[in-house]
Image: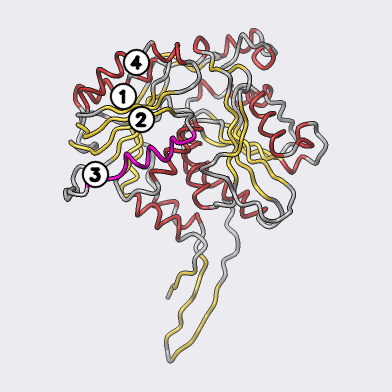
């Protein structure tokens, strides 16, 4: 992010001169943890944790981390798995094996309906510690986000940011993401227009999140911060929900900012151009390329746009990109509670055209979330420098 000029204030008392300086996001970025490789058997994970959270999905990697942890990883007091209203039959294929793993990991297993309006409240209730808990060694929370939809991941992150526990994010990377280059380039138009292809079908609902409602008090023009998916229906639905005039092109391009994912593996870089084609992102549109695997880059570029435009627009954020991009979006939404988050939920996901296998496993150890909150809360504050 291009750094804005700092505000310096000098005061003299005797021979002491103190400089007051505004702290920017860039000042704390080096203190946020990196994504690194996960070895469930290594000492990088605690031996005991309080909670393990995951999701039940149709992708094979739904089982990768739970099964690995069940064999050689930490043990938890409680396991929580999220269930979706979409693709219930497809997801059910993995239920038996997931429950077997969770029963080996934890003494108690709890399911939560991810699309229930009370999901966040019920998750928070499960975070409440027993009154007799005095130990600190097992207060960590492990969260497997491998098959966690972004609308759920954002809600989970909001709840995690309210805790004072160690939080470790786990992620299994798919071996193959659909469409493959051959699948897409054999019929590129069909991936945006044919309901039989693509990763999603239709839009069942589009709404501002109750967990991230934003505070649009000023009558300013709308600006949509959009991480698109590989199906343009959801992007169009979000844009139309924020301002119908934007959806029909009745506006200047400055009011929609596109954050386009750049895959971290070179063999998948063709997907960037495909994302532009599917979502009809023209060369003169306001757009940023953002690494799909670096949550900090998403946070940094969102902050750059916000600082550049705050006071001129009111913001709506639609995080439909990668899991790491959604984590960056959640931290950004914590920083700026005036930003409304908009979710567009598909009628269903296309289980046959999503992903296959697991190529690698990753983790982000945020440490104690109280420290993360303190870092984020310090952005925009005056600090004293000698």
Assign the magenta stretch its main secondary structure: helix
Front residue of this view, candidates 180 and 146: 146
Front residue of this view, candidates 31 and 231: 231
Front residue of this view, candidates 204 and 269: 204
- The quarter of the rendered structure image containing the C terminus is bottom left
Q: Contact, CB < 8 Å: mark 1 with mark 3? A: no
**Comes first in the chain, label 1 or label 2:** 1
- Secondary structure, mark 1, is helix
Residue at numbered disc 3: 139
- Secondary structure, mark 2, is strand
- Residue at the image position 38 percent from the left and 19 percent from the top: 61
Front residue of this view, candidates 377 and 262: 377
Residue at numbered disc 4: 95
Q: Which residues are magenta?
A: 117-130
| Mark number, residue 65 | 1
- Secondary structure, mark 3, is loop
- Residue at the image position 49 percent from the left and 65 percent from the top: 381
Is the residue 85 above or below the residue 20 in the image? above
């Amino acid at each position: 992010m291009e750094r804005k000029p700092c505000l310096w204030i000098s005061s003299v008392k005797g021979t002491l001169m103190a400089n007051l300086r505004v702290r920017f996001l860039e000042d704390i970025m080096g203190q946020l943890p990196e994504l690194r490789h996960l070895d469930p058997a290594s000492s990088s994970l605690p031996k005991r944790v309080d909670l393990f959270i995951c999701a039940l999905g149709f992708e094979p990697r739904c089982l990768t981390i739970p099964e690995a942890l069940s064999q050689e990883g930490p043990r938890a007091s409680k396991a929580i798995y999220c269930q979706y209203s979409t693709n219930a039959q497809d997801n059910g294929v993995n239920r038996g094996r997931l429950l077997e793993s969770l029963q080996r990991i934890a003494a108690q297993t709890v399911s939560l309906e991810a699309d229930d309006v009370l999901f966040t409240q019920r998750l928070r209730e499960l975070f409440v510690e027993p009154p007799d808990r005095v130990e600190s060694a097992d207060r960590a929370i492990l969260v497997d986000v491998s098959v966690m939809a972004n609308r759920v991941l954002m809600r989970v992150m909001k709840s995690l940011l309210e805790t004072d526990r160690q939080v470790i994010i786990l992620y299994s990377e798919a071996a193959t993401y659909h469409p493959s280059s051959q699948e897409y380039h054999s019929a590129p138009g069909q991936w945006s227009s044919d309901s039989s292809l693509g990763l999603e079908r239709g839009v069942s609902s589009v709404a501002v999140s109750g967990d991230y409602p934003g505070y649009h008090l000023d009558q300013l023009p709308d600006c949509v911060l959009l991480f698109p998916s590989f199906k343009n229906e959801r992007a169009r639905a979000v844009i139309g929900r924020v301002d119908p005039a934007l959806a029909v092109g009745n506006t200047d391009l400055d009011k929609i900012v596109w954050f386009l994912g750049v895959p971290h593996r070179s063999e998948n870089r063709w997907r960037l151009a495909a994302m532009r084609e599917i979502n009809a992102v023209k060369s003169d549109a306001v757009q940023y390329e953002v690494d799909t695997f670096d949550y900090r880059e998403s946070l940094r570029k969102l902050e750059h746009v916000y600082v550049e435009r705050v006071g001129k627009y009111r913001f709506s954020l639609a995080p439909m990109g990668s899991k790491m991009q959604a984590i960056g979006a959640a931290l950004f939404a914590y920083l700026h509670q005036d930003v409304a988050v908009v979710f567009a939920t598909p009628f269903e996901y296309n289980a046959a055209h999503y992903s296959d296998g697991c190529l690698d496993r990753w983790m982000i150890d945020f440490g104690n979330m109280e420290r993360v909150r303190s870092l984020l809360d310090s952005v925009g504050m005056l600090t004293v420098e000698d």
